[in-house]
Amino acid sequence: MSDTGNGAPEETPAAPAAPGAPATPADKAAELARLAERIRGIERQGADGPGARIPGPGGSGSGGSGSGAVSAPAPAPAPVPASAPAQRTAEPVAPAAVPPASPATAAVPDGPRGDALQEAAAVLTAGGAPAELAPAAVAEFGDDAAQRLRDDPWAVLGLPGVRPEHADGFARGLLGPGAEPGDRRRAQALVLWLLEQAVLRGHSALELTEVAAGLERLRMPDPAAAVQAAVEDGRVLPFQEELTGAEAHTAGGEDDEPPTRTLLALERLAMAEDTLAEALIQLMATFVPGEDPEPGEDQAADEPASAEAGTEDGDAEDGDAEDGDAEDGDAEDGDAEDGDAPAGAGEEAAPVAPAAPGPAAWEAAAEAAASSSSTALIRAVADSALVLHTGGEAARAEPAALVAAARGLGLRAWAATWTDQGRDSFAALVEGGTAGADTPVATLAELLSGAAGPGRAPDGTLALDLLVVLDAPLLDVDLAATVLESLADGTRLVLSGDPGQLWSAGPGRFFADLLAAKVCPAVASRTPDFGPIGELVSGVGIGELQPVEAPDKEVVILTAKDAGEAVHRAIQLLTDSIPRALGIPAEQVVLLTPGHGGVAGTRALNAAAKARLNPGPGRFGGFDPGDRVVDSPSPGVTHPARVLDGDATGLHLEYADGSRRTVRPAEAARLRHGWALTVHQALGRRWPGAVVVLPEDAAPGLTRQWVYTAFGRGERHLSVVHAAGPALVQAVAERPAQPRTTRLRAVLAENAASAY
């Protein structure tokens, strides 16, 4: 999609087309201009009704989320697959069938909830929809779901798996001839659906032109009225955003007025981005760097505070000695195993006088660092509350050096990683090659849930002075806001990550927007990733796909004539060539591919791998003992595991960190076979060997960002099997990333005075 937006609308409306004449492009442009002006008119009215107050790019100062502490944004709804444009059919279509209910949910409970389920099922059946949608309807709308669906049949579009044509068929089933295409209820539902679909593609907002075009494809007679109805309902918020740079030049302007674009955002995401911007600005505004003692001042006065802080650090570390007992599968879900949280984790920390090392102490720590990049990072953190750090896998040694230096200065410093594998590898860096249970690093889920980490201060914030978040590009808007709200005023925050990798599974591009906004110091690592794989990945990062010397077969690139041959070669590499030639066992090799479906998707690759490595009937819900699986409790979170056994209680799994857990039958839908993964599932992890499979149908979706991330998943060996032809080189050279429309950069630029 275009990121340029619309220019300022014309004041003089275009002449209407002759009756019966097809709308011309000029007519459509004029209608969109009138729609943008109508939205601006709502803002100028200053009414108090829902949707009347239009926040600008300035967050709370222009009608955003308000000031002060804001509760964590509501989590995004469960994702549904992105879909193709609606079919233009007049026949009623029932909502897509859903999988049969599990035994845990099949029985209708007694009492009011049971009545609500039965009533909702009756209404759904009356409209031609599957009764199996009743639990989802009650979960979404409450016990009065049946009445809600009667009053607004198009509300069914908010349920998982339901598409516009399904909702239209359901409405016709309930309303008959009264179900008109221009119905206000249909208009509101379609606008919400279009924005929810955009969320699945990573957008936190959409341009007005995009929404209007989508409504036109869905046969909405008056897109302008549909958008206005959704805005007045209050669940969609419009924003005016000034364009700058090349976007402004492309869009042009009128009478020296800067060009603008009109954005539409779901209320929850608009609030989350405003909250996030306010929290970032608050963090920077409340930061006070330490001061060196005056000449001759008795420095012993500082010792009690430092000693007390050091004691607290020691207590926290002792309390984290049991981190290994926390089960990984539960920890990243935010729960500790059987309630056995480590002693001290999640408890309120005793208030202490914070350590405040001055410039001289920080400079001494910086000079002692092992690399120039580590020195630059420590110096930046000495003077700033918020610092960005960019670099590849080898550059993670620099935030490790920062954590060690900060703790040496008496600060309560912790690091958070995306995965347990990242946690363990970072702990080894902090400890100089020997990871210990008391090392100040945890997964981000463990830290936020209290399963590990420094504990909480009396006000509920994390009891620390410095937090380093690794894998920062994987933070979506909601999670980033949660992290910021967990920090006390004045806490130092370092966000570290590789800007060339794929963005978060959820909406937004938090790390990239921060880099673009330039509201804080950014330290770029000069530490390269070594070896042939590092050289190849570095070249991809600058848009070049060049052959590299790999005397020990660290990199092998093979071509295939089609997807079928690509699958055959990939399985041969996994099961025979890599183990035999390189000594890397098959269980330490991963297959990576762009998607789940298709001839060379994860389903096909996993089926072929299972047939070779662990054939069986799939007697436990499609799985057999010995199967490699991945447990995905939420989008963007993946835990590799192995099936041990199964029974009526569920599947018994052993996770990569050695922990064990039983996945109940009702939760088994989140499991997939794990020999082959999508690159999004592999984020935050690396394997000794990686085989990247690129079928010919993957060409349209390939980007430099995807290739860079995929090629970087291998530690010792990378094989690339591709049937994409010249599309691979073209993607690396010409297509940096799939664009995402967000508001955070504009909000920050409007509200933060940058000195950098």
Image (cartoon, helix red, strand yellow):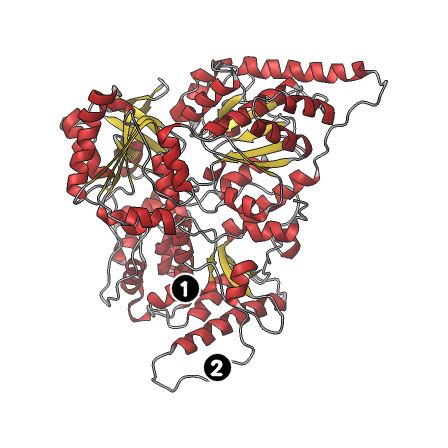
Q: According to the image, label 2 marks what residue?
A: 14
Q: Secondary structure at mark 1?
A: helix
Q: Residue drawn 54% across and 22% down?
A: 453
Residue 264, given in percent of the width and then of the height, sits at 49, 59
Label 2: which secondary element:
loop
Mark with earlier residue (1, 2): 2
Q: Quadrant of residue 670?
A: top left
Q: Residue 474 in the image: x percent, y percent?
A: 45, 38
In this rendering, the answer to whether 657 lies above or below 385 is above
49 vs 610, nearest the viewer: 610
Residue at 50% across, 74% down? 34
Tag 2: Cα neighbours inside 10 Å, few (<14), some, or many (≥20)?
some
Tell me where residue 650 appears, x and y as whole percent: 27, 25
Which residue: 30% across, 37% down? 105
* Residue type of the residue flagged with mark 2: Ala
Residue 185 numbered tag? 1
